[in-house]
Amino acid sequence: MKILITSITLFTTTLLSQSLNLNNNGSYTDTRLRTPKPAQQVTYAADLPMYELAPSVVTNKSNINASLSINVLHANKIAQRPRLLIAKYNPPTIKALFRLRQQYVGLINKVAYETSDVQLEGVPNINTGYGRGRSNIIKKSSRDKETIERRTEQTAINYLQQITRTHFKIRSNAITNKHIHHFKLPPGKYVLCIQQRIKDSHSKAMLGSSTAIWWTTFTIEEGVRKELFLDESNAITWQEIFEVTRS
């Protein structure tokens, strides 16, 4: 029995000596290799499929020139006007959107990697029963994950604003009822981007706000009036602008 106890003690001491180092300030540092568990990789198609708001578009014949009216009102909006931006869907815009999608895919993969659980190499799972034991998987806390996601969202919105400043230069001609925006547009194909800061009621870390986005391509025909009705039910996040494939 003494031999068995001594063996267990030596094994425990060896395991701890491999994994913990005593720092000069008296704290311990875990030196075991940490390997993030594989996250789903995100890829994309050769063309540029994007989110479409087609079910939210109402088309009416009109005796006046072609026009577009957008009624946007999010229930959780912060006291700021949404940014309504329209660009012609032409080769320069498409080229910029291809570049934006590449940046977004990189961000999606990055946040998946940083929020994934971490596995300690060389450390076995120990289950002693009665709900006790030791796992070799270190899980990210929900607060840590949320912080990473919020930081990534800020980067994504910055990328989006860089493109909208350069290519999305069409602004509304008038605003009625404080939230109905009116555009007079010549016939052609366009892409719409709307950004609205909103309260994040689901935030566990009370991080405040996030960005709701409405995004779609649309076509204006001569003598046709179109209306968009937008609210929280058809808002998306930056990760949904482009269609991607998760492996």
Image (cartoon, helix red, strand yellow):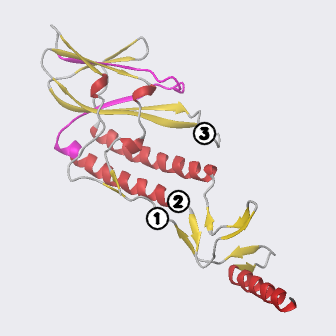
Q: Quadrant of residue 195?
A: top left
Disc nearer the start of the sequence (1/2): 1
Q: Amino acid at mark 1?
A: Pro
Q: Residue furthest bottom?
A: 3
Residue that numbered label 2 is attached to: 116
Q: Amino acid at mark 3?
A: Ser
Q: What secondary structure is marked by label 2?
A: loop
Q: Residue furthest top?
A: 63
Left or right, 213 with respect to 216, comes to right
User: What percent of the width, then of the height, locates residue 182?
Assistant: 30, 17
Query: Is 54 inside the magenta-drawn segment?
Result: no
Cα separation, mark 3 vs mark 2, equals 19 Å
Q: Residue furthest left?
A: 222
- Of 7 and 169, nearer the camera is 7
Q: What secondary structure is marked by label 1?
A: loop
User: What percent of the width, then of the height, locates residue 212?
Assistant: 45, 34
Q: Amino acid at mark 2?
A: Ser
Q: Label 2 near label 1: C-beta < 8 Å? A: yes
Cα separation, mark 1 vs mark 2, equals 7 Å
On-image quarter of the N terminus: bottom right
Residue that numbered label 1 is attached to: 38
Is the residue marked by circle 1 packed among few (<14), some (14-19), or many (20+) residues within 10 Å?
few
Of labels 3 and 1, the one closer to you: 1
Residue that numbered label 3 is attached to: 203
Of labels 3 and 2, the one closer to you: 2
Query: Is 75 inside the magenta-drawn segment?
Result: yes
